[in-house]
Image: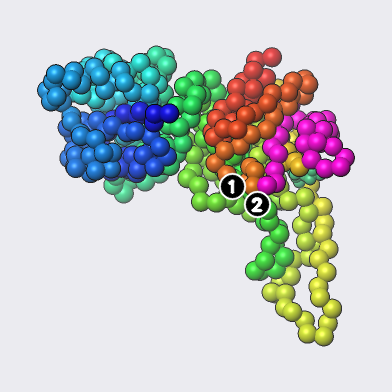
Amino acid sequence: MSKPRVVLGVGGGIAAYKACEVLRGLTESGHDVRVVPTEAALNFVGAATFEALSGHPVHTGVFTEVPEVQHVRVGKEADLVLVVPATANLLAKAAHGLADDLLTNTLLTARCPVAFFPAMHTEMWEHPATRDNVALLRSRGMVVTEPDSGRLTGADTGKGRLANPAEIVDLARLLLARPDALPRDLEGVRVVVSAGGTREPLDPVRYLGNRSSGKQGYALARVAAQRGAEVTLVAAHTVALPDPAGATVQRVSTAEELRQAVHAAARSADVVVMAAAVADFRPANRAEHKIKKSDGRPDPVITLDRNADILAELVQNRRPGQVVVGFAAETGDEHGSVLDHARAKLKRKGADLLVVNAVGDGKAFGTEDNSGWLLGADATEQPLPLAQKAALASTVWDAVVSFMKR
Ligand code: CTP
């Protein structure tokens, strides 16, 4: 199979240097990337860098390789066009159909998904001209992602930071697999997602934990934010993951901390997704000092207390119309298959939707892909074929959206 062809448009903003990391991430994950910078972008990164990293020549104008009709061909041949960073100027040109260089010509000739990753100062992002241009591009089915909040070019902070390059690569792969994965159908919807694994301390050094990487929960938060939701991500322990652009992240450690944070956020939420791996038990006593090998004395015995079932509490206290989504990591056993256990869990917990993953044998935990079933309280059962975690996340949001419409 030939490699998916991605055009990486680069706008003239300081975040252009991060486009190199996006380029690297895309080529390393098997994409054929053609970089089309604007003239201004080359003030920040030289053409040689893009040529070396992509393995293709780099041009900015329409008057090179004229017999090849590049200004039409580049866009027509692409499977995906990304613009990283999308400056206010580029968004304006794209919205109004201006075509005065190779990138803007490419944007007009592309018939594949087009995604803009904005980066600019907060004032420019919030300006009515930019808001209108973004709305216009989105109304035409183009993806304009939410920028991140944080440190901007100077000492200032605010909304307008480019999304993390790893996140951009993840969303690019999602759009290649499912061009319709990021509709703006969660605008105005308040969402809480819990992710990662809790840790229950035994002493100042040790804890009881689990293997959750947090990747699936982060993918759910990321996709929801890019579908327009107002997202609070309650993150327990995870592998190193970039904060999803546009989401508010609250960090917690123990099951009790996660419980407090999720309940507080759920009070004003329309949807709560419990993707976190919450410890069912905690050590009954937390030793003040490190537990030592006790020569001559018997080895310590750890007594466990039961933690609250947060998902069950959420279901009990849910606001009218609130959708509650649970997760179940199951292995089959002598009492039943993965699906038997999951069906029973959905009934027991009373959630509206349950995402079921088969675990064990290296499946689900820490991997980039995930599979399983999506069970509905209305007895619907949808298989979730093996796919990137972001793709599974967008299927879950599709189901949540149809649930909210009922
Ligand atoms: N969960 C929770 N609070 C807990 C344990 C789990 O809210 N104390 C949530 C998880 O976030 C997940 C769902 O419950 O959405 C199912 O988690 P799982 O560990 O599979 O279920 P348990 O209820 O712990 O059932 P069991 O371990 O007996 O299979």
Residue 376 appears at what percent x and percent y?
74, 24
> Is residue 128 depicted above or below 26 in this figure?
above
> Is residue 276 depicted above or below 399 in this figure?
below
Q: Is residue 158 left or right of residue 303?
A: left
Q: Earlier in the sequence, mark 2 or mark 1?
A: 2
Residue 60 appears at what percent x and percent y?
18, 29
Identify the residue shown where x is 70% and y is 50%.
255
Query: What SS does tag 1 mark?
Result: loop
364 or 88: nearer the viewer: 364
Identify the residue shown where x is 64% and y is 17%.
402
Residue 239 appears at what percent x and percent y?
55, 51
Res 366 label: 1
Can residue 259 be seen here? The reply is yes
Residue density around tag 2, few if under 14, some if 14–19, many if 20 or more, within 10 Å: some
> Is residue 170 depicted above or below 352 in this figure?
below
Task: Classify residue 375 by image quadrant.
Answer: top right
Look at the numbered discs 2 and 1 and tell me whether their residues touch, using CB distance below 8 Å: yes
Magenta segment range?
Answer: 332-361
Q: Is residue 152 left or right of residue 231?
A: left
Query: What SS does tag 2 mark?
Result: loop
Identify the residue shown where x is 54% and y is 34%.
388
Residue 207 appears at what percent x and percent y?
68, 62
Give the amino acid at mark 1. Gly
Give the amino acid at mark 2. Arg
Residue farthest to the bottom? 296
Q: Is residue 200 left or right of residue 40?
A: right
Res 211 label: 2
Ligand 1 location (quadrant): top right
155 or 349: nearer the viewer: 349
As for residue 338 lying within the magenta part, the answer is yes
Res 256 label: none
Can residue 94 be seen here? The reply is no
